[in-house]
Image: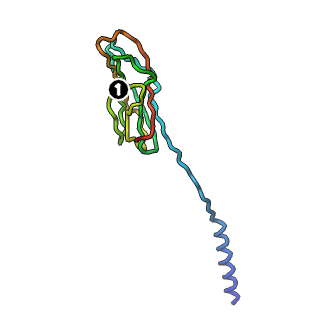
Amino acid sequence: MRFSFVLLIVLTTSSLVLAGNTAQQKVTYRIDPINEISINQGENSLLLSFDDSKTEGRNKWAITTNEDNKRVVGSLDADLPPGVKLYVELEAPEGSVSNGSVSMSTNPQDLVTHISRVAKGDLNITYKLVTESNINKIEIQRVLTIVLVDGF
């Protein structure tokens, strides 16, 4: 009888030791939206000129988002003179849709749509300047702004 009493004490003590080796904690986490877009900073100015027959220019852009259904829109800071048009085309990251060569204005224009959960750099931007033949020699400067916004 004495033997079973000792065994009972050992079992009770070992279960208390195990209870002290375990702890739980509720962990709450949040993943914030990431929505970033950039144009290659090495080329923050681009010259397009009919004098040099350089009516087309290129650059690179990058995008990162962890959200679904985004789009990239572009606009100019001021209207172009009559008879002058600037077309911009952004290469779309995989799974997205480029709207091709888009005539730019001060109104935001869709450049790339259907963007979801992507991180991609080194995408091409193509700029093309088109003028009517009777335009006098002018020099103008406009700022192109591209923005990542919610989709439709």
> What residue occupies the far bottom of the structure in this picture?
1
Q: Is residue 32 above or below residue 25?
A: above
Q: In this orientation, which residue lies closer to the viewer: 81 or 53?
A: 81
Q: In which quarter of the image is the C terminus?
A: top left
Residue located at (35% from left, 25% from top): 87
In the rendered image, which quarter is residue 49 located in? Answer: top left
- Mark 1 = which residue? 103
Q: What residue type is labelled 1?
A: Ser
Residue located at (33% from left, 18% from top): 55
Q: In this orientation, which residue lies closer to the viewer: 114 or 42?
A: 114
Q: Is residue 22 above or below residue 115?
A: below
Q: How crowded is mark 1: few (under 14 residues within 10 Å), some or many (20 or more)?
A: some
Q: Is residue 47 above or below residue 33?
A: above
Residue located at (43% from left, 17% from top): 141
Q: In this orientation, which residue lies closer to the viewer: 72 or 134?
A: 134
Q: In which quarter of the image is the N terminus?
A: bottom right
Looking at the image, how many numbered discs can be counted on the residues? 1
- Would residue 56 be found to the left or right of residue 61 on screen? left
SS for callout 1: strand
Residue 79's x, y, as percent? 41, 21
Residue 26's x, y, as percent? 60, 59
> What residue occupies the far top of the structure in this picture?
136
- Would residue 3 be found to the left or right of residue 108 on screen? right
Color encoding of the figure: rainbow
Residue located at (46% from left, 31% from top): 38
Residue 150's x, y, as percent? 44, 40
